[in-house]
Amino acid sequence: MAKARKVTAQYDGIDFSLLLGPDAEDVVTHSYVRDVVLPSGRRLALITLDNGKDHTRPNTLGPVTLTELEGVLDALAGRAAGGEIDAIAVTGKPFHLAAGADLSQIEHLTTKEQALRIAQLGHRVYAKLTETGVPSFAFINGLALGGGLEIALNCDYRTVNAAIPAAALPETFLGLVPGWGGATLLPKLIGIEHALEVILTNPLRQRTLRGADVHRLGIADALFEPINFLEDSLKWADGVLGGDIKVERPNEPGLVERTVKWPIAINIARKTLESKIGKIAEAPYRALDLIEKSAKRSKAEGFQAEDAALSELIAGDQFAASIYAFNLVQKRGKRPAGAPDKALARRVQQVGVIGAGLMAQQFALLFVRRLQVPVVITDLDQARIDKAISYIHGELETLHAKGRLVSDDLNKLKGLVTGTTDKADFAQADWVIEAVFEETEVKQQVFAEIEPFIAPEAILATNTSSLSVDEIGAKLAHPERLVGFHFFNPVAVMPLVEVVKAPKTSDEALATAMSVAQQLKKTAVITGDGTGFVVNRLLTRLFSDAMEAVESGTPFETVVEAQRPFGFPMDPFVLLDLVGLKVGQHVLDTHARAFPDRYSASPALAELADRGTLVDKNDKGEVTGISKLAREIVAKHRRPGSTPFTADALRRKIEDGLADEVQRILDEGIVSAPEDVDLAVITGAGWPFQMGGVTPYLDRVGASERVTGHTFHAPPIRGID
């Protein structure tokens, strides 16, 4: 068996020793320089960052890359002093400037001293972009994330390619801050509100900027089309150097904004963070502090503060947990455990959707947008079908109005969606998915009715959230063609699909489901067939404990306090309201029937679902608290002889319950590894990155050992307790 190898490098007296897996590859992004004679005759030294790999391997920035770039900049400074060059510029290989710091190296820095040195190294090198003695330009030709975008920010002038796939400062999502100048330079370049959008709002929503956005916000001074991007950028730089082009930056904040508007915006942002993500995550608040104080700090003072923040966060627990979660999503999520040979997947050229309700409408919209094949909707009522198609057309028109669909695509996609009450119209469908009521008998019936009309090789998919796929297929002539395909709501937003392999599911059906999930741009986790699969089984255990607690006289607020350390973006009652009370009650009842020793049906939730009330909301739809009627209903259903929980006691009960359920999921073979449990809850339940998933959290708080006698990971993954 190949062994892990140790690669050692020293910079500034610090030993950066990296443990790399046996298949790991040392990839260094090099700095290649060539002189370009501009139209005026001036000479520009163009630095091209290139790791020598194709477009699937973005440039990254590690200690070796930074040190090499530093040497290049020092040499160019000497040439500038000798009058050999009039400017320098930095760009990247095709499609990529740089994807930021090399996380495979950064994650191995375990001490504050190591982390401080890498932060300082970045600042030292980037500072030289404006210290060569001649103007510096960044030509943002492609992907520019984190430290890649900060290269541009540290230059004097910037152009951007209109076709870049993404530009962002995503560090706060990964438990870090923009630590190579972003938190200090960006607010002073584009203003406080735009900077907060880029550094905080976008990462938390996992959004990035397009080329036009980069220009609109004022990050780039000029926007050029891809066909002649480099040539146009060079001509533009020549104009700037000659004084023919005057660079104006209307978003650059003045004194009034820095002294008056700045504090107000920071205060609003802080309150928004607290309401959206709570106070557990450290990085967003550290970034907010850096942005706030950058208004009065010098560049050097701001960089020093970034160094301190970055060193503490890199060596801290939340970053380690975030990297574990990030690697799950980026690596395991793209290579799902247990996936069959892709060659077995059938090509889907037409989709059939059984049902015309809200969930069916979301399915049809997603399928037509991503697969761009005909989608046929069926239901018993033509009026419901017409309403569904009208909804889908309306959503497509909204996307067109926002500029996300061109007119030709809008008309094409609208024409691909049709509806019918005649099941014979499903004859050409390769993939048929149901979106009907969550009852086994109902799902059995609709599949039994559709099977005679579809081709023998067509795949059937059920969107059940908690029922047995095997039982749903019991009345099929060919149950091997049935696979579970559980979306999470809202369908277009939530990344996860639980692909359920029932005992009779064929490899062809499973491979087709995995292929469809990939085309839909979803993260697929393959699970075995069992009530609730992974995500709903764990969330329902939490809901069961929460409802038992309030029915025992525990205040709603105490229940919320008990689960706050989990770091969820919303409390269990807000989440239950979002899921839907009837759906939540049905899923809880299903689990209570399957596992009566661990899940309890809730009479209070049943009445709440019937009455349609749990939380109060304001005019904007924001939750303001538990409704008075909900409190009365829960009090009416007080469990005889029960006593209220304290927050600590309830937290321990929930943690131990989750540890017990995770172990049962693994023992039953629903998934094969704790990593699959974590990938599912991160992408399907919004378990925060900085917590690293449910199993590392349970290890850290001791619940794993209390319940199972062992941890799920050895050694336990670091993270916030």
Image (spheres, rainbow, N blue to C red):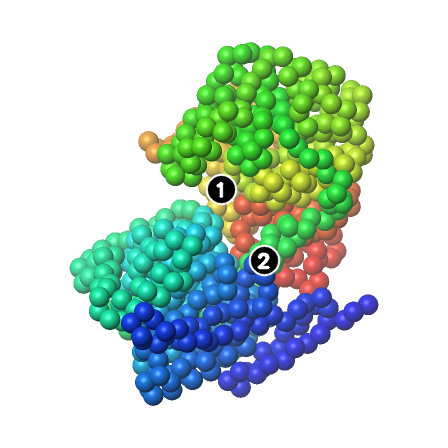
Q: Which mark's residue is nearer the viewer, 2 or 1?
A: 2
**With respect to residue 356, does 117 lie above or below?**
below
Q: Is residue 449 among the parts visible in the rendering?
A: yes
Instruction: Give the residue at mark 2.
Output: 56
The quadrant in which residue 524 appears is top right
In the rendered structure, which disc, 2 or 1, sits on the residue that comes first in sequence? 2
The quadrant in which residue 621 appears is top left
Q: Amino acid at mark 1?
A: Asp
Image coordinates for residue 374, horizontal then vertical, percent: 58, 27
Would residue 457 appear left or right of 35 to someone viewing this image? right
Query: Label 2 neighbourhood size at 10 Å, few (<14), some (14-19), many (20+)?
Result: few
Q: Amino acid at mark 2?
A: Thr
Image coordinates for residue 170, horizontal then vertical, percent: 46, 57
Secondary element type, mark 2: loop
Out of 244 and 461, give the one closest to the viewer.
Answer: 244
**With respect to residue 720, does 61 lie above or below?**
below
Residue for point 32% across, 69% down? 39
